[in-house]
Amino acid sequence: MSITPEEVTETLSMVSQQHLDLRTITMGISLLGCADEDMGRMCEKVYERIVRTADQLVPVAAQLEREYGIPIANKRVSVTPMAQVAAACTDKDLTPLAQAMDHAAETLGIDFMGGFSALVQKGIGDADRRLINSIPEALASTTRVCSSVNVASLRAGINMDAVLLMAQKIVEAARLTTDVDCYGAAKLVVFSNMVEDSPFMAGAIHGSGEADATINVGVSGPGVMAAALEQLPDSANLMEVAETIKKTAFKITRAGELISREAARRLGVEKGIVDLSLAPTPAAGDSVAKILEIIGVGECGGPGTTCALALLNDCVKKGGVMASSSVGGLSGAFIPVSEDAGMIRAAKDNALSIEKLEAMTSVCSVGLDMIAIPGDTPVETIAGIIADEMAIGVINAKTTAVRLIPAIGKKEGDVLEFGGLFGAAPVMAVNPHAGSVLARRGGRFPAPLNSLKN
């Protein structure tokens, strides 16, 4: 499909009046050729490979911004899950690899780098365990590196040993970064059914089924969607709301498709996917919560919220898939509490609870995202929250994730201040009745019956 001049003109209007941007242009890079039994040599190879492959990413993104007038909020890189690369060595501490990634990110001038990651949905290998044990120090000693661990999938079930281990590492990551509002935990996410091509942090990796280097683009546009829906009268029925969402999602995604094509061509790498997720920011008007309230919910989190979110998510996908030949990643609507002004307000008003957010994750793109919890929350409780979210992903054959931030030294009602796209996270109440038995039973929650599709 060709891009018409009329589409360009309309897109420029959305940029100038409704805060449209592309949330990220992310280059995925394979590091499989960097494996080495010597840690020093491997770090050198990782740094060299990333810098050599992505050396023009930021300049090309800046050039595209100037030419098309569409802001690109973040320039990012994702790499092969580092546990796979590190299997070649025997070092217990894999932090130097994260530091090599961070050095490369600094050299390139990018915002974030994802891939200090492991996939342990069915079992934890030696390299996986070494990487997971290194995560807290790796995140505390780097600025731009993000980490993700896949602990569940439709075909494998839930690795409950990995769930408890990750709950422990989340707390450790928060404790090591208490001086910066526990920021380390904000760069760590636990997944069910992780995808190989997401451009969004903290969960971006470059999967083993990808080309050596690819360009993946993540669109945004909650402000555009809200502006379109505000044109409808309260008397409009839900079918009319759905049609408006679909048409607007198509327009937003076309902007991402244009930049994706041009970036891949100019960088000489494979064009990957366009992730058409509505990704909010703390800026006024750039909120998924506001969209739900325009649809008709009194305040985000109130009765009807899950229904409105399901409608939004489904119609975003329906509109977006017609605008790109390669829709992928997560694609839908994100509900990160700290990154959405409306979610922050709803949490402070006690309209939005963790339990309601969990219900919402059954119909949205990802899961419990950027949620601050009291710093004294027991590890078993955190493991229970993760296990619940993983079960939603496994049973419903969808990607779900958990990014919790234990606010060390803080209690319910306090606020963590991150600034930028990460925003501010009000510390939310946690149900205290998790107990200590389930999280420590270990073993594996078996794959559900609907995994048998062959």
Image (cartoon, helix red, strand yellow):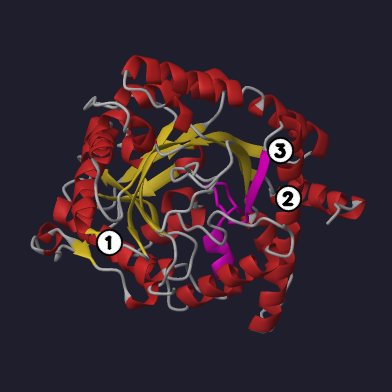
Asked if the residue at tag 1 contacts the one at tag 2, i.e. Cβ–Cβ closer than 8 Å, the answer is no
Part of the protein shown in magenta: 270-292
**Residue indicated by mark 2:** 257
Which residue ends up furthest to the right in the rendered image? 5
Q: Position of residue 79 (x, y in %)?
A: 48, 35
Q: Is residue 39 visible?
A: yes
Quote the CA–CA distance across marks 3 and 2.
11 Å
**Residue indicated by mark 3:** 264
**SS of the residue at dot 2?**
helix
Residue at left 55%, top 53%?
329
Q: Position of residue 283 (x, y in %)?
A: 57, 46
Q: Position of residue 375 (x, y in %)?
A: 20, 45
317 over 85 or under it: above or below: below
Quote the CA–CA distance across marks 2 and 1.
35 Å
Mark 2, other Cα within 10 Å: few <14 / some 14–19 / many ≥20: many
**SS of the residue at dot 3?**
helix
- The answer to which of 28 and 135 lies nearer the viewer is 28
